[in-house]
Amino acid sequence: DAGVIQSPRHEVTEMGQEVTLRCKPISGHNSLFWYRQTMMRGLELLIYFNNNVPIDDSGMPEDRFSAKMPNASFSTLKIQPSEPRDSAVYFCASSLALRVGYGYTFGSGTRLTVV
Amino acid sequence: DQQVKQNSPSLSVQEGRISILNCDYTNSMFDYFLWYKKYPAEGPTFLISISSIKDKNEDGRFTVFLNKSAKHLSLHIVPSQPGDSAVYFCAAISSGNTGKLIFGQGTTLQVKP
């Protein structure tokens, strides 16, 4: 199993540009999560999906952020327009929803820098 | 509203000694608590968990203790090794309908040879 795959690993963009982050969860996992890591707040949950349906997007900071999961093997997190304060590491994770005690499997993250 | 808090940003210990990482939470509905370990340029990896019905869970050198009355948990690493140097995140989850994992800010552990 290749694990959770995120792309790109690094993204540098100019303020105002659209940014799209991609995630392929582990096959068979039915829950997918997008997190953002910052020094101040640690790992912050942005949104999560269960069976491709968004369940809780209360962590999405602003309308500039949107996420989709068109099928069980792919999800995107889009920022439009991007701002310098969006610079962070964005992680995608997946899990089998019923196995809460075993936690999630995370991807390696996308380091986003908005200049 | 930080439901899971790790008040120590960093910890430094000598190789072979015990490392104790602490975590506090506010939500009494949490029923699982987990610790994750993160190396630079990698995603967090699951380390150990504990159900709210237990007060201790041990896995090799790692032991997690839960004090529900104090809403406090801790991770003990004995003996500490240089390879344990990483960021450790405490997390909690309610296995109800929401099912989302809430993380603390993380504690950076440095184990000196």
Image: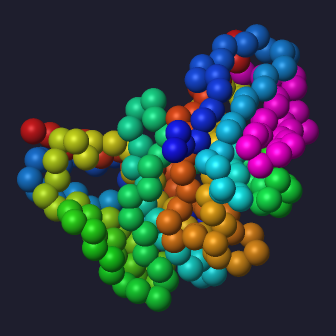
**Residue A57 percent across, percent down from the top left:** 82, 53
Nearer to us in this view, B46 or B78: B46
Colouring used for the render: rainbow
> In the picture shown, does residue B111 fall above or below A97?
above
User: Which residue shows up at 62% across the image and 58% down it?
Assistant: A95
**Residue B7 percent across, percent down from the top left:** 43, 57
User: Which residue shows up at 63% across the image and 81% down it?
Assistant: B29
User: Which residue shows up at 85% across the image and 16% down it?
Assistant: A16
Image quadrant for the C terminus of chain B?
Answer: top left
A20 to the left or right of A81: left
Residue B96 occupies which quadrant of the picture? bottom right
B101 to the left or right of B47: right
Image quadrant for the N terminus of chain B?
Answer: bottom right
Is A78 one of the magenta-colored residues? yes
Is B113 one of the magenta-colored residues? no
**Residue A46 percent across, percent down from the top left:** 73, 48
Nearer to us in this view, A74 or A91: A74
Please indicate, yes or no, whether residue A51 appears anywhere in the rendered image: yes
B15 to the left or right of A41: left
Q: Residue furthest right?
A: A63
Nearer to us in this view, A43 or A23: A23
> In the picture shown, does residue A12 fall above or below A41?
above
Residues rendered magenta in the picture: A63-84
Residue B97 occupies which quadrant of the picture? bottom right
User: Which residue shows up at 47% across the image and 88% down it?
Assistant: B53
> In the picture shown, does residue B104 fall above or below B25?
above
Please indicate, yes or no, whether residue A37 appears anywhere in the rendered image: no
